[in-house]
Image: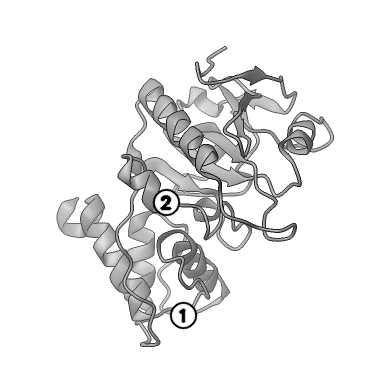
Amino acid sequence: MIRSPLTRHFVLSPNIGVRVNEAKPDMVILHYTGMKSAEAARAWLCNPESGVSCHYLVDEDGYITQMVGEEMRAWHAGASSWEGETDINSRSIGIEIQNPGHTLGYRAFPEEQMKAVIALVHDIMARNDISSSRVLAHSDVAPGRKIDPGELFDWAWLHREGIGDWIEPAPPDDTPAEITPLQAALERFGYGIEVTGIADARTEAVVSAFQRHYRPARFDGVADMSTLQTLQRLLRASGKDREGR
């Protein structure tokens, strides 16, 4: 079993499987638990009736529990997609970060917890040769269905430590953006969205997911110029723009 040396406790979850087509993990997906305590989350993630699991759980004090070996497929992402891939569980390592979530008293993530997450992600990236840009939020791969780890998670801090894509977002404004180029840019970045030119519910969900991660000052799902400008700058910075491909 592949384990992180940063793990302080191991509790085996029965909710696992084999990675489909012997896929190797090339993504890290960050979640929040949405539960009152890490102890409650551990129990739920190891309960056969829950149908969910993750590789690692990080408590608010930085204590790391491992529940699934990295070589195995944990059940954390659910119905999801990124860059055309739809079996995210087979391609990823899932980290649950203890936080009550939006329904139980959502709050900022403590410094010790953030430091532990950063150290753990670095460890996983190095061991599995995972690109920094493949560290994503659950909400990125499941927009409209999931919103974690949410707008209070400090992605800018992770980026300063060499994890994830980030750029200083354009200030929110009320200038409408054209839908077609915004959809095309979101698709190019990796989101599961079709370029239809129609501002439908799916577009609003994906725009909100992008904003929650990359422009957290406002994440109302409105297709404004601030969102498009931030996205275009991210595409250039990450090399995902057309010229960089």
Q: Residue at x 51, y 26 (%)?
A: 21
Local SS, label 2: helix
Residue extending furthest toward the right: 49
Name above or below for residue 121 compared with residue 10.
below
Name above or below for residue 69 compared with residue 150.
above
- The answer to which of 168 and 195 lies nearer the viewer is 168
Report the mark closest to the observer, 2 or 1: 2
Q: Quick one: label 2 or label 1, which is nearer the N terminus?
A: 2
Q: Amino acid at mark 2?
A: Trp
Q: Quadrant of residue 13?
A: top right
Q: Residue at x 66, y 18 (%)?
A: 10
Q: The N terminus is located in which quarter?
A: top right
Residue extending furthest toward the left: 243
- Is 238 displayed left or right of 96 in the figure? left
- Percent across and percent down for residue 191 are 44, 57
Q: Amino acid at mark 1?
A: Ile
Q: Quadrant of residue 164?
A: top left
Q: How is the image coloured?
A: one colour
Residue designated by label 1 = 198
Residue designated by label 2 = 155
Q: Residue at x 45, y 49 (%)?
A: 82
Q: Residues within 10 Å of mark 1 (few under 14, many from 20)?
A: few
